[in-house]
Image (cartoon, coloured by chain):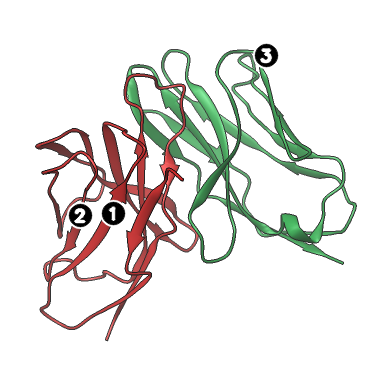
Chain colours: A red, B green
Amino acid sequence: DGGITQSPKYLFRKEGQNVTLSCEQNLNHDAMYWYRQDPGQGLRLIYYSQIVNDFQKGDIAEGYSVSREKKESFPLTVTSAQKNPTAFYLCASGDRKDSNQPQHFGDGTRLSIL
Amino acid sequence: GDSVTQMEGPVTLSEEAFLTINCTYTATGYPSLFWYVQYPGEGLQLLLKATKADDKGSNKGFEATYRKETTSFHLEKGSVQVSDSAVYFCALSGGGSEKLVFGKGTKLTVNP
């Protein structure tokens, strides 16, 4: 079945450590997105990529980095510069040629600080 | 910029009660409108969508009508079930951008 796979489901970060969240899609979508979800705040866009080897900052990019070396993959690194990383992270993909099509979401990664 | 405002939760209902979750938007141009649902511990799933004025989206007994004159896309269901307990997000896209803009979400709890 086509879909989006995020891993791991749970992740713990130590002080000063960078961690990388994986996101893979087999929907042949050009666009991919990373969101952060905090209680009562909805979803906020961290980074997005419309095509391989290109990406743009979203609303809350500070302390995060991404890469898009393959169409299928869009990993997110939470760096030590992100002082409040505890949140639920959601990856999504979409067909950028048609804004009427919805984004498809993975099941998320819950990141906590040790 | 574009924005979505949805009613604050949480909302608690008894089984078979009528549900309305209000959603209004501000956007340039003619956005597409969506309702997503998130069950505990999971990602978001598309519930329904509408792409132009007066369109009605429907799925699993839920409905929402794209009202351009009131810039609204309220979610309704005539008889909720315990299994409908989840967080519901209103969202929009369009106006030349493929990015989604989300409301803050409304948590619904349905008691037996």
How many numbered badges does the structure rendering display?
Answer: 3
Name the element at disc 1: strand
CB under 8 Å between callouts 1 and 3? no
Q: CA distance from mark 1 to mark 3?
A: 36 Å
Question: Could you tell me which residue is drawn at 38 percent across and 49 percent down?
Answer: A4
* Chain to which mark 1 belongs: A
- Image x and y of residue B28, in percent: 41, 17
* Chain to which mark 2 belongs: A
Q: Are marks 2 and 3 on the same chain?
A: no
| In-front residue for pair A70/A55 | A70
Category of crowding for the residue at label 3, using alpha-carbon neighbours closer than 10 angstroms: few (below 14), some (14–19), many (at least 20): some
CB under 8 Å between callouts 1 and 2? yes
The quadrant of the image that shows the C terminus of chain A is bottom left
Q: Are marks 1 and 3 on the same chain?
A: no
Q: Earlier in the sequence, mark 1 or mark 2?
A: 1
Question: Could you tell me which residue is drawn at 19 percent across and 83 percent down?
Answer: A14
Is B88 situated above or below B57?
A: below
Q: Which mark is residue A23?
A: 1
